[in-house]
Amino acid sequence: MHRLMRRGRRIALGGVLSGALMAAMAISSPAGASTTTAANHVILGSGSSTTYNMMQALDTLFNDSLGCYMTQPSGTTQTLDFSCASVNGGNQVGQGYTENPVNDVAAEEPALGSSAGIDQVELGGPGVGATATAVVNYARSSRALKSTDQPGLNFVSYATDGVSWLTFPEVNGKGTASAVVKSLTLKDLTGIWNGTYKKWNQIPGYTKTAGDANICVYTAQLSSGTEATWASALITSGTPAELNAYVNSLTSAPAGCKTPAHETYGQSHTIFENEAQDIVKNGDEANAIFFFSYGKYQVVCAKIRTGECDNSLSPTGKKKTTVYLGEIDGVAPTVSSILCSPCAAVFPVTRDLFNVYSNGSNTSPTTGFPAATPATINYVSEIGFLCKTQLNTKAAKVADPSTGVWYHTEIANVISAQGFIPWPLQKHEDQGTIDTPAAAVLHAAGDSTYAPNDPIIGNGTAHNEAISNPPGYCKVFTTDS
């Protein structure tokens, strides 16, 4: 039995670095040099801002997972294409048991928004799109599938989150008009975002206690998954454009709301999702309201770091400023109320966090796009690294060789550290749930590199994990049916 050797690298690729990686690949070769295609693969994700940092952390965990040994022993010629070693003096060679058989590299492109990432996957094929797109392998999404999404997409949910409203009860040591507003109904929130309630003391239940100040309503970019979730909860049509209509209709800022020079109210109050520092920069946080991810709030607001949710960016930053993530229908957003396991009351605005890949079923000459690569399936699909139970054929937990900790524990810890809630164990990994599951994509590709790591299609002596319709830590949905 070969001894498993740790690969000598630690890579954390973010959006900027991944772009640099692509640029480096395009650099002309020196005269007389011979180049070849790399034997491993770069797996690029794009889309959601909400899950960007979390996926970066999960990328690092995957990139550091055990792969084949690539360095040749002394006295032999070292290959320069990142291929597995053919001989290495008894150390691990080839593609033995590993979560990342050929040392693939996962990376994230900068955030454009969930819908934009899904568009990139859809427009990456032979179909003619209105907008030229860079090729990506999967989309990060903090919104669920829509009827307008093309067939052929599988949405793999690996965590859950809530979305609520955010205000500033105290600014520069002084209480604000919204300080007494602790719980709002979905009807109240709809009235705020459609302009029915323009002042804090117009909201039912707060007419005698809230201040007589205008509400400075903020919204997010149309491609935002957080925006899509909020629109679905508040607006009958569920469209982000309708949610933003009131903000965009204001030709001038209401008293107490501030608009920078040369910007309309709609421009200055349509900010990037989950970035409250833009409110602080505008200077009207005392009367502002915005929708915000529960998970992102735990990281960037509850911990009050880097001035992202307080006024430490301003000259008066030494005075106390507080932020508040509100209750909806009397229920506060918490792990138990969002996951509802167990819970006395369900938080009403929740959403799954997804990675979206193509299952190859959309072969339309005008709207079709190719199937995700086997390397992508091995990482983000329902049978991939982020979802399976990480149990070997003897039902033993597969541990990270550098830490000795079960991979699933490490994955769940990364998700929790980002403020989100990992799913508990689900009954089935992918059997009988969708028309074209990830296992079918590997079958169609004739894959042999990653199939042994799939507990459904691995067989005989070629499999590394327990088979027979195992459970997993993800939920999968499809636009096919």
Image (spheres, grey):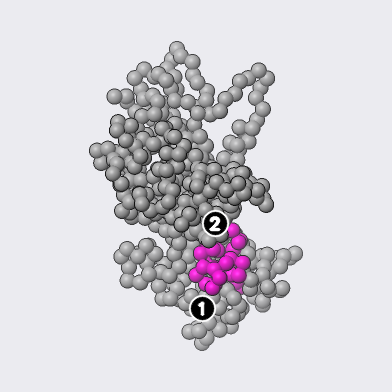
Relative height, residue 152 to residue 178 (above, below): above
Relative height, residue 54 to residue 163 (above, below): above
Residue topped by disc 1 = 188
Q: Where does the N terminus fall, quadrant-wise?
A: top left
- On the image, the x and y values in percent for residue 276 come to 56, 62
Q: CA distance from mark 1 to mark 2?
A: 31 Å
Label 1, residues with CA under 10 Å away: few <14, some 14-19, many ≥20: some
Which is nearer the eye, 205 or 408?
408
- On the image, the x and y values in percent for residue 70 come to 44, 25
Say which element carries label 2: loop
Q: Residue furthest right?
A: 262
Q: Identify which amino acid the numbered label 1 is placed on.
A: Asp
**Any mark on residue 393, and which?**
none
- On the image, the x and y values in percent for residue 319 come to 55, 66
Relative height, residue 216 to residue 92 (above, below): below
Of labels 1 and 2, the one closer to you = 2
Q: Which range is magenta?
A: 215-243
Q: Is residue 315 left or right of residue 380?
A: right
At 30% from the left and 46% from the top, the residue drawn is 470
Q: Give the mark nearest the N terminus, 1 or 2.
A: 2
Q: Is residue 421 visible?
A: yes
Asked if the stretch drawn in magenta spans residue 129, the answer is no
Q: Identify which amino acid the numbered label 2 is placed on.
A: Asp
Residue topped by disc 2 = 149
At 50% from the left and 78% from the top, the residue drawn is 187
At 55% from the left and 54% from the top, the residue drawn is 150
Q: Is residue 416 visible?
A: no
Say which element carries label 1: helix
